[in-house]
Amino acid sequence: MKKILYVCCVLFIVSCAKENPLEKEIAAIPVDLNIVRFDQVFLNATPSDLPKLKEAYPLFFPNTVPDSTWVYTMRDPLQKELKQEIDAVFEDFAPVQQDVKSVLQHMEYYFPEYNTPKIYTVTTEDYRKKVILYKDMILIALNTYLGADHKYYEGIQQYIVQNFRKEMIPVDIATEFAYIQIPPMRERTFLGKIIFHGKAQYIKSLLVPNVSEAMQFGYTPQQIDWAAANEAQVWTYFVEKELVYSTENKLDNRFINMAPFSKFYLEIDNESPGGIGTYIGYQIVKAYMKNNDVSLQELLRKSAKEIFNNSKYKPKK
């Protein structure tokens, strides 16, 4: 028994030693979190509840949609099934609330001018709209987080559904938030684009530091390992093929946009993750922040050219 207690004490001391003081400070930031489960409200409602719902939640009932549409939806048997599926995955909603609270605390720390938004859980028919940010509101579509192997996602490509799990909710919030913090992209070169997306990825790394780098990129562990192992080769390819300062729009689909793999037109294509250009852009931004004394807000205003020229970027070999 004494030996077990000794081991436990050692582990506790090591854990405390490794605790990040900054993360401890951020975790203490007070956030008035109130997640409204509108998905439950609507899925539990009957047509007779519609007038009260429209009065309480006018945002979700635009005048352009007739009441008959909402009545039809409420009576649809698939709505009952949808509720059951959501309830099964989100039976314990506390971990989700804690994850959301954490990302909001990080947003408050790094962007103190941003006011805590109202948060609503909803359902959507468009799986591409998992999280929507308005100025003072966040909508989270819970039916897009039921698990990668869920029957609802049959027919959707694997590289997309691999992120349809509830652990990705804070990452998706961070993603949407990151892009609205960056000034519009003005540099049309490939370098300008990957650094633009690299800035967003850098913000995400700050907002959700406790999730894996793979999750921050929407990659599998194998995909992030491939990206890290092949970083030098990928950068060499970009340089040798004279892509760095190219303004060819086709490069977006090849190396930046979501895709099952990146397109080098080589045998390695199927092994590579999609959007490898964003990974390289992130490495450049990270190198710049490591080698220059600038604030996060200053980084966001810097041009891609300035960031690259002062980054001292040297990919790992």
Image (spheres, rainbow, N blue to C red):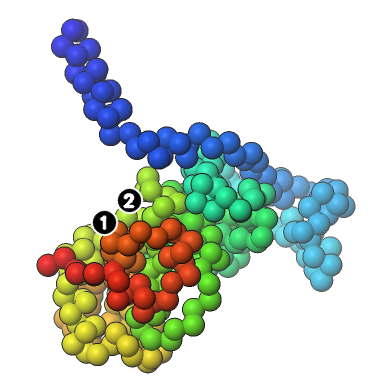
Looking at the picture, tell me which residue is in the foreground, 34 or 161. 34
Q: Secondary structure beneath disc 2?
A: loop
In this view of the protein, can residue 228 be seen by the observer?
yes
Badge 1 marks a residue whose secondary structure is: helix
The residue that appears at 31% across and 75% down in the rendered structure is 308
Residues tagged 2 and 1 counted as in contact (Cβ below 8 A)? yes
Does label 2 or label 1 sit earlier along the sequence? 2
> Which amino acid type is marked by label 1?
Pro
The residue identified by callout 2 is 212
Q: Where is residue 118 in the image (x, y as percent from the top left)?
A: 67, 49
- On screen, residue 136 versus residue 159, left or right, reads right
Q: Residue furthest top?
A: 2
Residue 20 vertical placement versus 122 (above, below):
above
The residue drawn where x is 35% and y is 59% is: 293
Q: Determine the residue located farthest toward the front in the rendered image.
A: 293
Residue 96 visible in the current orientation = no
Question: Quadrant of residue 255 in the image?
Answer: bottom left
Q: Quadrant of the N terminus?
A: top left
Along the line of sight, the residue nearer the viewer: 190 or 249: 190
Name which residue type carries label 2. Ser
99, above or below 259, in the image: above
Mark 2 or 1, closer to the camera: 2
The C terminus is located in which quarter?
bottom left
**Residue that carries the numbered disc 1 in the rendered image:** 221
